[in-house]
Image: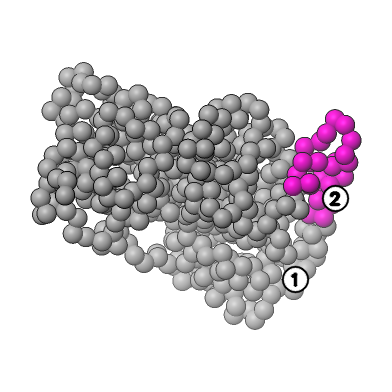
Amino acid sequence: MPKLTGAHLFIRCLKLEGIEKVFTIVGDTILPLVDAAEDEGIQFIDARHEGAALHMADGYARITGRPAVGIFTGGPGFSNAISALPAIYTSESPVIFIAGLAELPEKGMSSFQEIDQIGMTTPVTKGSWLIHDKTRIPEFVATAFRTATSGRPGPVHLSLPIDIQEAEISEDDLPQYMPQEYRPTGRPQGDPALIEQAASLLMGAKKPVIIAGNPARYSVDPDQLQELAESTGIPVFTVEQARGLLDDEHPLCFGYADGALNPTARRFREADVVLLLGKRLDHRYRYGRVFSDSAKIIQADPSAAEIGRNRGVAVGIEADLGAVVEQITAACKKWAGPKENITPWLELLNKDAAAWDAELRAKADGQEPMHPLDVYTNLEQHLDKDTVLVMDGGDYVQWGRSFLKARMPGRFQRLGPLSHLGAAVPYAMAAKLAYPDSKVLAFSGDGAFGFYSMEYDTCIRHNINITTV
């Protein structure tokens, strides 16, 4: 049996957190981690560029709804990987970004490939830590996962010096805990009085809408969101990682919550009550001004800092979004059945949606030069509910974002708020690793495809069967 080291301890902690795959490029200051991962049975997916590998971790987290890990050598490997980190941070993905570095006693002495990894990652993570003691490895790993998954999710960073990796450990150093012992296991509930206020506003509205954003992906049960929609009759829109949380084919789902891609969403201006499930009132929503001044905003969010940010709200609920959906569903059921006073509103939205679909299909006329929608309308018949669709940058891709349907959570992926080009291929690779029996299609413009096209070599080496259009 090989000797046990800090690297083994670290990898065993990852296994306790349910990690089975790690995305990487092997380098000098993580060699002990690589050996330990092989000993412990964790699969290393080695890419051709560290940025692509960290994007794969991001994609894996988005698609599965669980934390994912990227491990990279310190210095240059870290520097390449960090190019993906701002995009992961703004997309709010629970990614654990791990990097090696030179021996701890040499820190600050211009040691091997030394840079300030903690300082560089702090602005674009929820937390960044240097592990300075082998006996505290379990504590730091638990802290990293707890931070990445709590509240609004997001990336974290751990730097692990090579001498800590190589240090021999005893049985006393091995993790003696389970992850649930080091984080909340319940779901923070919404204040009952606020839930009742929200339900009263929703059930009294004539033009209500529900909009689900990023954090809803990780906490809201799709069946529960469907029950809320069906029991109240309130239309639902989804955006960002919440796409597919309610099937776009459902009669109460009206697709992308983005007026630039979906004209039906331009009716937000007429909504009288809006339930935001984790959707930020950022620049894409004109800081809340896509809604009328008279609209009553109900903002549910796992972070109190987001409530009332950029626009005042009628009801602000800090809580787990899954719990809020269940609570509001139960409260609304006191009104005994779906609302009838919003029938004209639903008819208007359906009319808009049908008109937009007809307009898009009319552009796919088979004439030359070929319209991008000729591609998407022909592909449509080959897609099923399990298909994973990944959208990169490129003008032709935007037509696909407007036309194609999000059918299931995690299976309709877009770049994120930074609109960073090139990540579709790594996302698609991660999707195929997560769902090997599903079709995976990436759509990319010619410029975007150039960023990580060499990752097709990674696809060949790891037998990852994706299609890029």
**Quadrant in which the C terminus is drawn:** top right
Q: Residue at the spot x=31%, y=29% of the render?
A: 27
* Residue 279 position (above or below residue 198): above
* 288 relative position to 41: left or right: right
Which of the 4 image quadrants contains residue 271?
bottom right
Q: Nearer the viewer, residue 324 or 430?
A: 430
Tags 1 and 2 touching, CB below 8 Å = no
- Residue 269 visible somewhere in the drawing: no
Residue where numbered disc 1 is placed: 341
Q: Nearer the viewer, residue 326 or 466?
A: 466
Residue 58 drawn at (x, y percent): 46, 43
Main secondary structure type of the part rendered in magenta: helix
Residue where numbered disc 2 is placed: 358
310 inside magenta stretch: no
* 332 relative position to 172: left or right: right
Q: Residue at the spot x=13%, y=51% of the render?
A: 173
Can you tell which of label 1 and label 2 is closer to the viewer? Answer: 2
Question: Which mark is on residue 304?
Answer: none
> What is the three-letter code of the residue carrying label 2?
Ala
Q: Which residue range is magenta in the image?
A: 353-379
Residue 358 drawn at (x, y percent): 85, 50
In the rendered structure, which disc, 1 or 2, sits on the residue that comes first in sequence?
A: 1
> What is the three-letter code of the residue carrying label 1?
Asn
Which of the 4 image quadrants contains residue 74?
top left
